[in-house]
Image: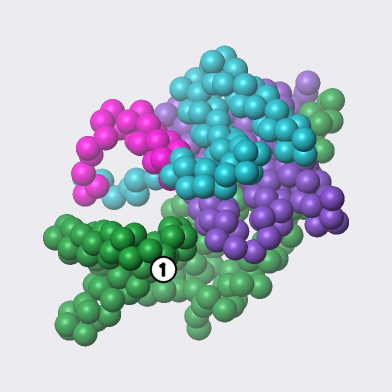
Chain colours: A cyan, B green, C purple
Amino acid sequence: MMFEIVTYMILFAMLLALISAIIGQSVYDKILAVNIFGTITVLFIALFGFLTERPEFLDIALVYALINFITTIAILKFFEYGDMGRSSHINDQADI
Amino acid sequence: MSDRIKYLHITGLIISQAVLWLLLSGHYTPLLLGLGSISIILVTIISLRMNLIVYHQPEIGLQILNFIPYGFWLLVEILKSNIDVCKRILNPSLPINPSLITIKASQRSELATVAFANSITLTPGTIAIDVNGNMIEVHSLADVGIEGLETDEMNKRVKQAEIE
Amino acid sequence: MSLINIISYLLIFTGALAIIVGLLGVFRMPDFFTRLHAASVIDTMGTMLVLVGLMLYSGFNLVTVKLLLILIFILITAPAAAHALAKSALHGGVKPVLGKEEQ
């Protein structure tokens, strides 16, 4: 009972993040919304583990946090330079 | 680079992997510990073959012990600016005044500058957009964020945490 | 229900409220860079309150360590992702709206 209300609130927030990913005008708005969606999903998985009293779900949350960050950086790199395999010594700028 | 530093780095890698495995696994049966040691050895061999271990370590510019009080101060700042941004979002007239300013970072090592820029971005209301040498370009949501940066307190506190 | 459970529930509830307020900000803000500010409310306040609340609820064991690892990881990567987004949006031709915004 205690966690159910909060879990429904987080689910509602995930729905809002998906809507903002769909109606986002530019590519960057959409990437931002997907990043927010990933962050909220990490929290949702952690809460769901406590809701069902199986805290082993936290491992999945940890991996999801790692993948979420890598996804954001990889998609941004793709949109900024046109491919993901640009070698870093072509110009001096740092990658992220 | 001398062999001593190389072995020091490899030992550090193995120890940190072992600690991470023990903390995350939670099962201490012989089978799982054996699997853990096998994965640690595999990862170490692969990172040696890929030359991922950097022997000429960049000078660590932050003293960990000095950095802990800065972390707590940053936490309080984050909470204060969070409440400010939340108030602005919930205000029906949306009282925002976005602006771009350039501020100077007076830290000497690169790592301390990175810590400063990350602190700026972590605080809601201000985002570090571009870093050119010592100048950081900051996008700010409202005047309060700019005032907080222009008093230079965060800059001074990161500089204090730096090794002299 | 003990006192510490009530405190942790209040923290988690406030965190969920902060997430919804941040998303409201994402919908209300006029341009991309101001939306980033609203998103950083979610990344800091939301995750900190929810995960600290869960830490208090779970007591002190390996679960707390995992929650702490998730929290530290998110607090390190969130500014990196926000900075990468802001930088590539600026280089990709998104002009920030400056000055007083009238609603």
Q: Residue at position x 53%, y 51% from top? A: C70
Is residue C50 rendered to the left or right of residue A67?
right
The foreground one among B122 and B99 is B122
Q: Is residue A87 visible?
A: yes
Residue C88, percent across and down? Answer: 43, 35
Q: Residue at position x 50%, y 80% from top? A: B163
Quick check: is A78 in the magenta stretch?
yes
Q: Is residue B162 visible?
A: no
Residue underneath mark 1 = B19
Q: Residue furthest left?
A: B49
**Which corner quadrant of the image does residue B30 belong to?**
bottom left
Q: Is residue B22 above or below residue A33?
A: below
Quick check: is B111 in the magenta stretch?
no
Is residue A24 rendered to the left or right of residue C12?
left
Query: Pointer 1 indicates a residue of which chain?
Result: B
Residue B108, percent across and down? Answer: 47, 71
Residue C78, percent across and down? Answer: 53, 46
Q: Secondary structure at mark 1?
A: helix
**Which corner quadrant of the image does residue B21 belong to?**
bottom left
The foreground one among A19 and C37 is A19
The foreground one among A53 and C70 is A53
Q: Residue at position x 85%, y 56% from top? A: C3
Is residue B6 rendered to the left or right of residue B164?
left
Q: Main secondary structure of the magenta part?
A: helix
Q: Is residue A19 above or below residue B86?
A: above
Q: Report the amino acid beneath label 1.
A: Val
The foreground one among C50 and B132 is C50
Q: Is residue C53 above or below residue A15?
A: below
Tell me the magenta residue range.
Answer: A65-89
